[in-house]
Image (cartoon, coloured by chain):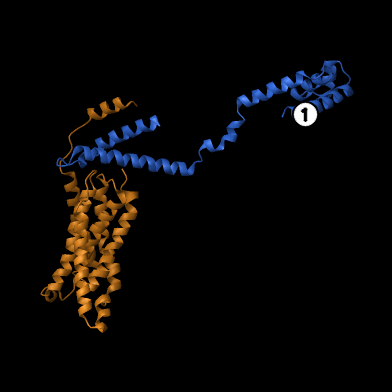
Amino acid sequence: LPDEVEDLVQETLLAVHNQRHTYDAGQPLTAWVHAIARYKLVDLLRRRGVREALNDPLDDELDVFASSDTDAADARRDVAKLLERLPDQQRLPIIRMKLEGLSVTETARMTGMSESAVKVGVHRGLKALAAMIRRER
Amino acid sequence: MKTDDLIAALASRAESIEPHVLQRRYAIALCSGAFGTMLLMAILLGVRPNLADAARLPMFWAKLAFPAALLAGALLATVRLSRPGVRLGRVAAALAAPVLVMWLIAAVVTLAAAPGEREALVFGDTWKSCLVNVPMLSLPLFVASLWAMGGLAPTRLALAGAAAGLLSGAGGALVYALHCPELAAPFLGIWYVLGMLIPTALGALLGPRLLRW
């Protein structure tokens, strides 16, 4: 990861600075710097190993992400499409009661249907929707 | 923080450092550790009373030379492991040599002895106290050498801790040799080595925890 690489570079530079008293003038500079860089890399990998042992990577839990925003929108669009195929006396009661959450009385008042017609419409409409979904699969 | 800014910040406060930090730290550690070890020895054990008699026997000097050689080798290893990018090289062989020589002598002595005497050569009278006292006497040196290494930059932490542990173990064994009445090579080859390995193993265990930087 680019972020971690930059962190590692900075940590190594800091270590080179802080540990400069351990450099012996008789020893090759590159070997000294290389050993510090490798130590810091191993340190980073070990720390990350510990952290990852304690955390499950989210990629394995894709089901959590499966119900994302787009899925909800997709479902809404599918339902709307199927609803369009229903006759008015089934579609309107379902929209009022099941999608908007109104009561039977309120639905009856808004659509001008009788309460029993509303109930029957919802019942038959849902059955028809279920049949349509089954057929489409 | 941008890396360029970090470099600029580091470069702006790059005062020169004191020279010979490593040598100074180990000098302090060895002096204080040796002082602590001898103090423990004087308080808890005391020098064996017939030291002058024993000093006439060559094996007494071999008994001192054995941990002394290991002490020198371990000090070399410890110093090397305190710096990034320095290889152990032949130091490992220098550490193995005294042990192998002692085992060779021990094998010769044991084979030359009558079968009934062999057990006495191996166990002596004091093998248990050897196993307790050598690690106990090595404690001050153990703490001191880990302190010295903690201010430096070991990159192989378990190995570095083990080297510091062996350094203290050899120091403890060297001081304990002034108290211990045993002179048989098989005894030294087994119990002294085991006694020194206890702080070595402890150092290897503690190194990764205590020496990180």
Position of the C terminus of chain A, as image quadrant, is: top right
Question: On the rendered structure, is B109 left or right of A76?
Answer: left
Q: State the residue at coordinates (31%, 52%).
A: B158
Asked if residue B139 can be seen in this view, the reply is yes
Q: State the residue at coordinates (57%, 35%).
A: A62
Can you give x and y, in whole percent of width and height, for residue B134 in the image?
Answer: 26, 65
Q: Chain of mark 1?
A: A
Can you give x and y, in whole percent of width and height, for residue B171 in the image?
Answer: 21, 61
Q: Quadrant of residue B97?
A: bottom left
Q: Quick check: B44 above or below A136?
A: below
Q: Quick check: B17 above or below A127?
A: below
Can you give x and y, in whole percent of width and height, for residue B197 in the image?
Answer: 28, 62
The residue at which mark 1 appears reads as A130
Q: Quick check: B202 above or below B183?
A: above
Q: State the residue at coordinates (26%, 84%).
A: B116
Position of the N terminus of chain A, as image quadrant, is: top left
Tell me which amino acid carries mark 1: Ala
Q: Quick check: A137 above or below A96?
A: below
Question: On the rendered structure, is B51 left or right of A136?
Answer: left
Q: What number of labels is visible? A: 1
Residue at the left extreme, as displayed: B56
Q: State the residue at coordinates (25%, 30%).
A: B10
Report the front residue among A13 and A56.
Answer: A56
The hue used for chain B is orange
Q: Secondary structure at mark 1?
A: helix
Using a 10 Å C-alpha cutoff, classify the residue at mark 1 as few (fewer than 14 neighbours), some (14 to 19) or many (20 or more).
few
Question: On the rendered structure, is A31 left or right of A130?
Answer: left
Report the front residue among B7 and B185.
Answer: B185
Chain for colour blue:
A
